[in-house]
Amino acid sequence: MLLAQFIRDAARQLEALYPPGEARSLVARLVEEVQGVKDYVAVLEPSLEAAPELSEGLARLLDGEPLQYVTGVQEFYGRRFRVRPGVLIPRPETEILVREACVHALQLPGAREHGSGALSGPRVLDLCTGSGCIAWSVALEVPGARVVGVDISDEALAVARTQNPAAPPSFPARPGISAPQFIEADVLGGLPELPDGSFDILVANPPYIRESERAAMHRNVLEHEPALALFVPDADPLLFYRAIAGHARRLLAPGGWGMVEINEALGAQTASVFESAGLQNVQILPDFFGRDRFVSFIL
């Protein structure tokens, strides 16, 4: 089949699941990842044949599978990260969490003296690390940083440990950059593996979607992304934040800073958890659309 014909047919079929503009965008990204060309090349080269693998990718998209699982890649903070079924797909709003963590880390002593990668660099803890996109991004943006990622999912950690984010500058091109360390542990537990006061920065993107909110979510998320990384019980939607607040109290050094991603409907309640734990300067921060999406704090 000609590539131009494939693009037309695929977009039309996907309109059964997605709005027309989104359907066309999915096809364009599929073509770029699988065949390695932009979709407009089909117009410039009308005799160009579609790669056979495109049909398999389209079938998976028509089954509701997210494009990122089909291609195995998600762009995040200017780099390409590996993803696969069983591992949460990074979202654009989480880049705000990375940006703020980097800003604070770069202000710490040792962040700018990175020539030798000395052990005096910022110490960063990423709870519920998933694919490791936050941990890797901070490690790559903050020379000298020592980053630890924690997750309960061995499937997610297998991906996180083998990431090699592809984009300039890529690991390990910059001096002083060290790969994150990843630990399998339950964030809802005590994390005895980690010593008291051993981190300057704590970040987390824990599960925060209430079970009752499932009905408003897209099929490709519900049927394909890991529920373990997404959902919390309606009866106790803040259980991860209580645990994280406790970890912040114990694991952050004096003056340490933290930030967590939150459910937009529970901003005030989530902030209250950190205030009740004795953390200071607790603030609710917005995402790109002005929705309550993060809580930051200082020990």
Image (spheres, rainbow, N blue to C red):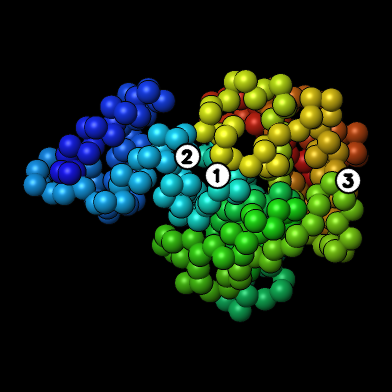
Q: Quadrant of residue 294?
A: top right
| Disc 2 target residue | 66
In the rendered image, residue 108, in percent from the top left (x then y), is placed at 69, 59
- Which image quarter holds the N terminus? top left
Of the residues shown, which amino acid type is indicated by label 3? Gly
Rendered location of residue 36, percent (x, y): 27, 54
Between 271 and 192, the residue placed more toward the observer is 192
**Residue depicted at 65% across the width and 31% down the height:** 293
Characterize the local packing of mark 2: few (<14), some (14-19) or many (20 or more) Cα atoms within 10 angstroms.
Answer: many
Contact check, label 2 and label 1, Cβ < 8 Å: yes
* Residue type at tag 2: Pro
- Please name which of the two marks, 3 or 1, marks the residue nearer to the observer: 1
Q: Is residue 212 above or below residue 138?
A: above
Residues 26 and 286: in front is 26
Tell me if I can see residue 174 in this picture. no
Query: What is the CA distance from the residue labelled 3 to the residue labelled 2?
Result: 35 Å
Q: Which mark is residue 89?
A: 1
- In the image: residue 49, left or right of residue 139: left
For residue 246, the mark is 3
At label 1, the amino acid type is Ile
Q: Nearer the viewer, mark 2 or mark 1?
A: 2
Residue at screen point 60% across, 53% down:
131
58 over 212 or under it: above or below: below
The answer to which of marks 3 and 2 sits earlier in the sequence is: 2
